[in-house]
Image: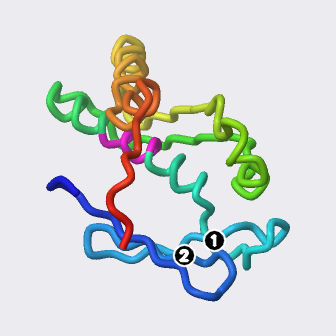
């Protein structure tokens, strides 16, 4: 593997409960109860949305701070309607996954209309969003 950020995921025998270790922190990921999981943790799609939302909020914070704009806070709401478990049923024969994510921005602070409009444009420059829109390739490394 090439140098860079490394994220490690481990699954045991607790059905779909998976631990994700990143940045020295451990997150638990699971499937909803209706899909055979315990339903007590975010799903893989939830984490994807969370990554886009966090990146969007950070991008807006960085831009507003550089401009000296009075952005007091940002809430990013993201929605999608795919089911990871249902996608996996046909994933060996069909292309599956999200086709569209709906994003809603709520910016707090005494911003002008022009500042809000510019920040809305800047939200589309979130690096995670841009990476997904361009498409990525997951390269299989040697299996141990």
Residue sitting farthest toward the top: 114
Sequence-first disc among 1 and 2: 2
Which quadrant of the view contains residue 61?
Answer: top left
Residue sitting farthest toward the right: 34
Q: Secondary structure at mark 2?
A: strand
Q: Nearer the viewer, residue 104 or 88?
A: 88
User: What's the magenta bit mostly, secondary-structure-wise?
Assistant: helix
Instruction: Classify residue 19 as left or right of residue 3.
Output: right
Quadrant containing the C terminus is bottom left
On screen, residue 39 above or below 45: below
Is residue 30 within the magenta segment? no
Residue bearing the label numbered 1: 30
Percent position (x, y) of residue 135?
44, 29
Q: Nearer the viewer, residue 77 or 19?
A: 19
Mark carried by residue 73: none
Percent position (x, y) of residue 58?
31, 42
On screen, residue 78 above or below 50: above
Asked if marks 1 and 2 touch (Cβ < 8 Å), the reply is yes
Q: Secondary structure at mark 1?
A: loop
- The residues colored magenta run 52-58
Instruction: Classify residue 90 as left or right of residue 140.
Output: right
Residue bearing the label numbered 2: 18
């Amino acid at each position: 593997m090439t140098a860079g950020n490394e994220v490690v995921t481990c699954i045991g025998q607790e059905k779909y409960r998976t631990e994700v270790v990143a940045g020295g922190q451990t997150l638990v990921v699971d499937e909803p109860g209706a899909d055979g999981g315990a339903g007590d943790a975010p799903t893989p799609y939830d984490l994807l949305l969370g990554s886009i939302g966090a990146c969007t909020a950070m991008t807006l914070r960085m831009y507003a701070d550089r401009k000296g704009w009075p952005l007091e806070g940002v809430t990013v709401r993201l929605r999608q309607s795919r089911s990871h478990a249902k996608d996996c049923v046909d994933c060996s024969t069909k292309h599956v996954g999200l086709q569209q994510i709906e994003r809603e921005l709520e910016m707090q602070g005494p911003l002008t209309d022009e500042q809000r409009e510019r920040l809305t444009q800047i939200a589309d420059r979130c690096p995670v969003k841009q990476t997904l829109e361009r498409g990525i390739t997951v390269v299989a490394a040697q299996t141990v």
